[in-house]
Image: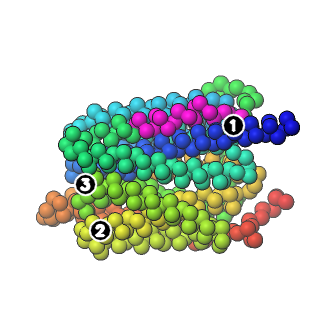
Amino acid sequence: MNIPEHKTQESKEEKRARHAWYAYDFGNSAYASIILLAVFSAYFKNVVVGGAEGTRLWGIAVGAAAIIVAILSPILGAIADVARSKKLFLGIFTAISIAFTAALFFVGPGDVVMAMVFFILAEVGYRGAQVFYDALLVDVSTPETVGNISGKGWAIGMLGGILALVLVLVPMQFAGEVFKPNHAFLITAVVFLVSSIPTFLYVKEKHEVVEQLPLGKLIKDSFQKLANTFKEIRTYKEFLRYMFAFLIYNDGIMMLMDFAAIIGGTLFGLGTVELLLFVILIHITGAVGALLFGRIADRYSSKISVIYSLLILIVSLACLYFVGDSKIAFFIIGAFAGFSLSGAQAVSRTMVSQLAPPDKMTEFYGFLSVAGRTSTFVGPLVFSTLAYRMNNHYENIGWATEAAEKGGQYWGIGSIIFFLVVGLAILLTVREVTASNPMVYPDSE
């Protein structure tokens, strides 16, 4: 009688911990939706800076944050691996992100340096916290449930993004001039704060530290481990090929997410309310896409699923060149892009589990994560620099200011398509792995 009772009690605690872990994803998705996708990127470009220079500086800000996170990632990953302090560091980086997200409220027209510094710090906090949040997954799951729990966290995060967008959209629509875009940043910070609290209250770290290392040795060991992993990965050709494919097409995906609001505002004249509606739409179609492409991956293969999703995304972006300034067309294209983009993101990580040796799974996941963070500054800088320089070129040959800026944006879109096509081309050379045709390594049984 006592054994079942113990199991029931334990099950309740685990369930509460899982729900608390989900809640954090709910909140940090609010940050991604408002700051990166819908409001702040467009506000920075159009209000704080203005014109093509706004696009250029936004790319620099996103790239700078990515570089800082790339440098920190090996160190943070090592800490997450060996220290029983994941929640402590999660709290530190979350607090940084929330504080500087709220501080964006004070950014107005012309406050370029303040806006860039506050955004970069908020972004570093957001990305740094993600390392420790992901590391807590092993504390709320088992090897048998990790995939399901991870997927549910992603889906609940989408709901958090939609809620944040609605909380901003409603007062913006009905309160008129009283509610300004700056208020959206305060709302985002509050949603992020409230949603993160259950994680700190109910998620327990299960893995004790065997040995506490000095910080200097911890940093040195983390980079040594990274170097050793790279040496090992070079002997796994299929994984290495997939890694290069992923890094390139993922850069294209990140470029699209970072500049979607700027593209919508510049080429199609979308205002803040319309951008909020647009991002809600791509969240909904993205959730559907993730579920559908996940089923395709299970029925056929992850490779086939990612190929289909990238093809749809490439065709969707190419359509932007043929629809003029139709807002309806942009929303339709966005629906398909969100559908395919989320599918690619959701399925890509499963390919790692299929291509990596079973005994090196965590190690290879970690390496791909670090490599991904290291490369993501390239795409935004390419987009922003190309769009800015082509804008200047068109102005120099006599184009009107608005036409020149639109022309530059089309070159930026072309760079996204280029990254996606090159990544897809490399992906086609990667072996297709299925449950009936698994990857078998000589040293595995």
- Give the distance between the C-alpha atoms of the residues marked 1 and 3, in whole angstroms: 45 Å
Which residue is identified by label 3? 271
Amino acid carrying mark 1 in the image: Glu
The label number, if any, that marks residue 5 in the structure image? none
The label number, if any, that marks residue 328 in the structure image? 2
Q: Nearer the viewer, residue 2 or 102?
A: 2
Under circle 2, the secondary element is: helix
Residue 66's image quarter? top left
Whether residue 440 is visible, yes or no, is yes
Q: Which residues are magenta?
A: 189-206
Under circle 1, the secondary element is: helix
Q: Residue at x 45, y 31 (%)?
A: 96
Q: Earlier in the sequence, mark 1 or mark 3?
A: 1
The answer to whether marks 1 and 2 mark residues whose Cβ atoms lie closer than 8 Å is: no
Furthest residue in direction right, as rendered: 1
- Give the distance between the C-alpha atoms of the residues marked 1 and 2, in whole angstroms: 48 Å
The label number, if any, that marks residue 13 in the structure image? 1
Amino acid carrying mark 3 in the image: Gly
Instruction: Judge whether residue 368 is colored magenta.
Output: no
